[in-house]
Image (cartoon, helix red, strand yellow):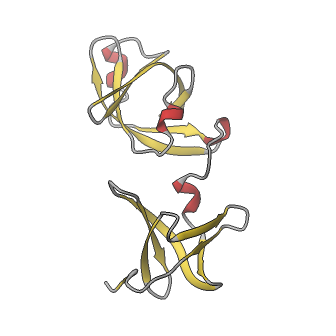
Amino acid sequence: MNLIYIGKLVNTHGLKGEVKIISDFEYKNDVFSIGNEIIINNTAHKINSYRHHKIFDMVTLSNINSIDDAEKLKGLNVYIDKDKYKFNGYLNSDLIGMDVYDNNKYKGKVVDIYKTDNNDILVIDGIKRHMVPNIKEFVKKVNLEKKQIEIKYIEGLDNEN
């Protein structure tokens, strides 16, 4: 099983076991579909219903039928088995640990990804720390097989701290 973190189950809603999940997973609309499985506390749960409410992803699960059942899951992380999905493109988690180059010059490795309202920011640790927006103007090519990213580096992407 190839588990990927997609969010956190933060609360219950109602008496019939609906749960509130906070997720910023980039493909959550594909994942939170009726019949798909999410994994909580090493147990697979089939999704019976899904709706979006405010900042929450509201889900009912096939083996959670009451608020008492749902209460036991509060605060737990939610995962999917990546091997059961085919995503159009790469996941942010695929980029962590990749080597980053600018015109064949090594810049470092991706160590983190910050999410912002506009776009994600790759944090690259090398001789200096770089912060690169994950947009086509800066990220020119992602090679998943070689675990390499080619960027267009410009002055000012260094974090001097």
Horizontally, residue 44 falls left or right of residue 70, namely right
**Residue lying furthest right:** 145
* In the depicted structure, whether residue 71 falls above or below residue 87: above
Q: Return the residue nearer the eye: 152 or 99.
A: 152
* In the depicted structure, whether residue 105 falls above or below residue 78: below
* Residue 22 x %, y %: 34, 38
* In the depicted structure, whether residue 149 falls above or below residue 5: below
How many labels, in total? Answer: 0
Q: Return the residue nearer the eye: 94 or 139.
A: 139
Report the quarter where the N terminus lies. top right
Residue 42 visible? The answer is no
* Residue 161 x %, y %: 31, 84
Residue at the location (31% across, 24% down)?
A: 71
* In the depicted structure, whether residue 61 falls above or below residue 73: above
Residue at the location (40% across, 80% down)?
A: 157
Q: Return the residue nearer the eye: 151 or 31.
A: 151
Residue at the location (54% across, 68% down)?
A: 139
* Residue 42 x %, y %: 53, 34
Residue 12 visible? The answer is yes
* Residue 74 x %, y %: 33, 31
Residue at the location (48% across, 64% down)?
A: 134
Residue 60 placement: quadrant: top left
